[in-house]
Image (cartoon, rainbow, N blue to C red):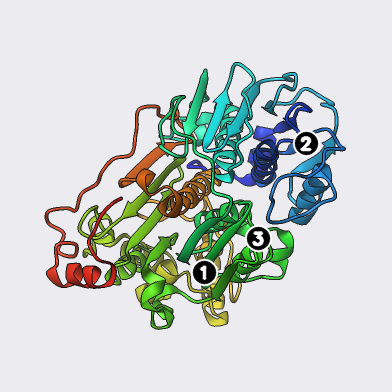
């Protein structure tokens, strides 16, 4: 759980108890693929939200056939799929799969027309549309599209989360926690919050050509999972990420489970399995390296369409040096905001506009702060912050000694543990002199990844509707209804995207520049 206060996990368990959530799928929509996609993804997210969610009852008609295209955790029917998912995830959440609501929950997430039990959030989806209400049942339509379904699940789970933590807003100093009052329809096609937006059918086969995913964590993994949930896909994908699946980050990795963490599976290998097991027309090249160590292996075609789902500002800037034809980026914060970008060199802002390389680079500043607190040297910490390097045996031993000597309330890293996993374990404990990077609330980076998958689909199937060039919103505050996509033009003082040599390189590779 992300928080800004000093409340420890055992105290949170008591404070947030019982944290009882029911997610229900009513019989009238139980055989609709779009309803099943929404339902399955909502269960996937909710099961990862301990200690805010402490008990999860999954209610559905137990004999419902499985008709949705789900990329993992198969089952003989929908209920069997849900059990398989939860058994593989082994969450701290107490869970049950049942046909009836046994007790009044703290919050109820309803898909379809189930009778409300306790405070209720109503959810629906149709194609690209995500539908949400605090007042009435929402219709689930016949159009099947995992982008709309998964966005609906993120919105619905965020509303459940807000209702559970709203009595304890003191834990979120400076972060507005505003539950939805009323009804909204959010188009993942246009990013407008209103009805009547275009909602085209997906083509029978979604063909996305070549795609390079740099970073297969919360956002990149969610994008891959969304693409893997299509009915039919053709693609040649490179997945680049040095990290393994580890338990501290399972709450954000919707494509992974506890078995993956125990085996310390490489994220890129899991993305490869996820997609190749689903589609005969998809090949995935797993590259388990940091981007800086991968550049020599990537060809010109690998830079045509690039998703930069990395936490490192340096890696983002390095990617821009290769002048991709289209470069997507996504981000999320501990305040529940999510942001997505579509960048075309010389037309929109570039990575150097967005994250300029200055003497005040946040990654270097953070490395200085970590060295001040824990030693090891700024250079060592910089590589950990930038590339998510693992701790060596010697580094772990030195840190154990420093933590003990200084009486710091920190968990000691293990040898071979990645920096981000150690940082996640110390969420709320790691006090840096100039602020503390918090772990994003799980559904925020997942939402960004789902929307980026939609952008990849639109790039090839609906080019007139691609993002131009930035969109943001919030899942913790009041979901904003008047924030359409905004054009972010190149900054006048950016030396990179006005550089004649780089612009010429782009045109040699890809031809004329256009956002559409």
- 183 left or right of 66? left
Give percent across and percent down for residue 226.
57, 51
Taking the view exactly as shown, the residue that stands out farthest to the front is 204
Identify the element where label 2 is drawn. Answer: strand
Q: CA distance from mark 3 to mark 2?
A: 23 Å
Query: Which one is closest to the eye, mark 1 or mark 3?
Result: 1
Q: Earlier in the sequence, mark 3 or mark 2?
A: 2
Q: Earlier in the sequence, mark 1 or mark 3?
A: 1
Q: CA distance from mark 2 to mark 1?
A: 37 Å
Are there few (<14), some (14-19), or many (20+) residues within 10 Å of tag 2? many
Residue 59 vertical placement versus 277 (above, below): above
Give percent across and percent down for residue 239.
52, 69
The mark found on residue 236 in the picture is 1
Give percent across and percent down for residue 498.
14, 62
Query: Which one is closest to the eye, mark 2 or mark 1?
Result: 1
The mark found on residue 58 in the picture is 2
Q: Is residue 297 visible?
A: yes
Q: Which residue is mark 3?
A: 247
Quarter location, residue 376: bottom left
Identify the element where label 3 is drawn. Answer: helix
Q: Could you say which is closer to the camera, residue 167 or residue 509?
A: 509
Give percent across and percent down for residue 327.
35, 60
Identify the element where label 1 is drawn. Answer: strand
Q: Could you say which is closer to the camera, residue 51 or residue 201?
A: 201
Residue 493 vertical placement versus 123 (above, below): below
Q: Residue at x 28, y 72 (%)?
A: 509
């Amino acid at each position: 759980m992300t928080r800004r206060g000093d409340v420890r996990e055992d105290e949170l368990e008591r404070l947030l108890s019982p944290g009882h959530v029911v997610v229900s799928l009513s019989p009238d929509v139980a055989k609709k693929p779009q309803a099943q996609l929404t339902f399955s993804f909502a269960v996937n997210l909710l099961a990862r939200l301990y200690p805010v969610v402490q008990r999860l009852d999954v209610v559905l008609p137990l004999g419902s056939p499985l008709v949705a295209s789900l990329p993992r955790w198969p089952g003989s029917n929908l209920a069997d799929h849900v059990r398989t998912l939860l058994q593989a995830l082994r969450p701290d959440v107490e869970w049950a799969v049942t046909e009836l609501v046994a007790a009044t929950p703290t919050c109820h997430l309803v898909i379809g027309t189930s009778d409300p039990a306790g405070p209720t959030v109503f959810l629906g989806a149709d194609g690209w549309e995500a539908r949400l209400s605090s007042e009435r049942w929402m219709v689930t339509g016949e159009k099947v599209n995992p982008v709309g379904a998964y966005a609906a699940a993120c919105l619905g789970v965020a509303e459940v989360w807000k209702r559970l933590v709203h009595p304890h807003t003191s834990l979120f100093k400076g972060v507005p926690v505003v539950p939805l009052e009323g009804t909204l329809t959010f188009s993942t096609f246009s990013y407008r919050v209103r009805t009547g937006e275009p909602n085209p059918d997906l083509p029978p086969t979604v063909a996305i050509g070549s795609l390079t995913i740099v970073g297969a964590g919360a956002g990149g993994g969610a994008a891959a999972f969304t693409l893997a949930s299509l009915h039919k896909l053709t693609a040649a994908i490179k997945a680049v990420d040095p990290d393994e699946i580890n338990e501290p980050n399972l709450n954000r990795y919707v494509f992974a489970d506890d078995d993956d963490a125990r085996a310390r599976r490489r994220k890129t290998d899991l993305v490869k399995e996820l997609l190749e097991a689903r589609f005969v027309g998809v090949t995935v090249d797993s590259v388990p390296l940091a981007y800086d160590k991968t550049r020599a292996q990537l060809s010109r075609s690998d830079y045509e369409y690039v998703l930069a789902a990395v936490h490192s500002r340096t890696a983002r800037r390095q990617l821009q040096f290769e002048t991709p034809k289209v470069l997507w980026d996504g981000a999320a914060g501990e305040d529940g905001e999510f942001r997505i970008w579509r960048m075309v060199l010389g037309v929109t802002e570039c990575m150097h506009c967005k994250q300029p390389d200055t003497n005040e680079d946040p990654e270097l500043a953070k490395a200085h702060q970590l060295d001040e607190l824990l030693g090891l040297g700024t250079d060592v910490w910089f590589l950990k912050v930038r590339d998510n390097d693992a701790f060596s045996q010697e580094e772990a031993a030195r840190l154990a000694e420093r933590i003990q000597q200084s009486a710091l309330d920190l968990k000691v890293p293990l040898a071979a543990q990645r920096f981000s996993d150690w940082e996640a374990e110390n969420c709320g404990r790691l006090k840096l002199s100039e602020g503390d990077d918090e772990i994003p609330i799980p559904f925020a980076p997942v939402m960004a990844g789902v929307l980026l998958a939609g952008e990849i689909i639109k790039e090839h199937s609906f080019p007139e509707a691609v993002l131009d060039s930035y969109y943001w919103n919030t899942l913790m505050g009041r979901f904003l209804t008047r924030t359409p996509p905004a054009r972010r033009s190149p900054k006048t003082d950016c030396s990179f995207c006005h550089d004649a040599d780089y612009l010429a390189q782009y045109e040699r590779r890809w031809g004329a520049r256009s956002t559409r």
